[in-house]
Image (spheres, grey):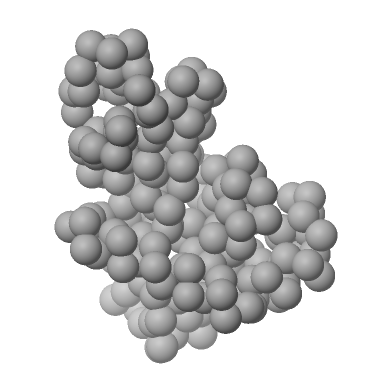
Amino acid sequence: MSKHFLYVADPMCSWCWGFSPVIDKIDETFGETAPVRVMVGGLRPGTPHAMRDKEKEAVREHWEHVHEASGQPFDFAFFDQDGFIYDTEPACRAVVTARKMDEEKALPFLAHLHRAFYVENRNTAKEDELADIAGAFGFDRDAFHAELTSPDTREETQGDFWFAQSSGITGFPTLLAVEDKQAMLVTAGYLPWDALEKPLAGWVAGEGAQG
């Protein structure tokens, strides 16, 4: 019986950053039996305009809630800058690039992108910056940039977005437990490890899914 987890996230989604230690723990604990496969959902793909003050206020409130719930760090100096375009498509495409180059690195690279954006205040909406971040992570920087900007990778990223939309996934993080092509919802949104450990252990052990 084939089992895996399907993790649908966005590298510029604050609740996904909050969930990052949890999904890492899931992978560490259950990955040999049920590996975690990563897809990108597209939180704000194609946003054309710079963030306005009201948008900054709303996003900052989300970040504060995530920090309170998860303890994950944030650099709130992000909100002091002007002209930031919160387009998550390039960062999502970078995760797809990592997945294409080495699928086993997709999840740790997602966490690396989260940290670059939320803690290091890097502009993960820029392709050159994403290639630099990937180079520091361990990918060949130029090869990554070439794959990142290729039509095939753009198309595959749109395919991930389409999957999320067609599956009725409206928020991130979303975690599905998949057994023999049958997917069951584990969580749509942030949950701490303590709330997931026992039900996931039961599912991995063949005791049925509980979400």
Snapshot quadrant of residue 51: bottom left
Q: Which of 198 and 78 is in front in this view?
A: 198
Q: Which of 89 and 74 is in front in this view?
A: 89
Q: Can residue 187 be seen in this view?
A: no
Residue at image position (23%, 43%) is: 188
Is 35 on the left-hand or right-hand side of 197?
right
Residue at image position (72%, 72%) is: 145
Residue 19, compared with residue 146, is above or below; it is: above
Q: Where is residue 11 in the image (x, y as percent from the top left)?
A: 48, 57
Is 14 on the left-hand or right-hand side of 143?
left
Q: Where is residue 17 in the image (x, y as percent from the top left)?
A: 45, 46
Residue 133, compared with residue 74, is above or below; it is: below
Q: Position of residue 148 (x, y in %)?
A: 64, 71
Residue at image position (29%, 39%) is: 181
Specify the farthest residue to the bottom: 49
**Figure quadrant of the C terminus:** top left
**Figure quadrant of the N terminus:** top left
Q: Nearer the viewer, residue 7 or 194?
A: 7
Residue at image position (21%, 23%) is: 209
Q: Where is residue 102 in the image (x, y as percent from the top left)?
A: 66, 49
How many tags in the picture? 0
Q: Nearer the viewer, residue 29 or 126?
A: 29
Residue 155, compared with residue 195, is above or below; it is: below
Q: Can residue 93 be seen in this view?
A: yes
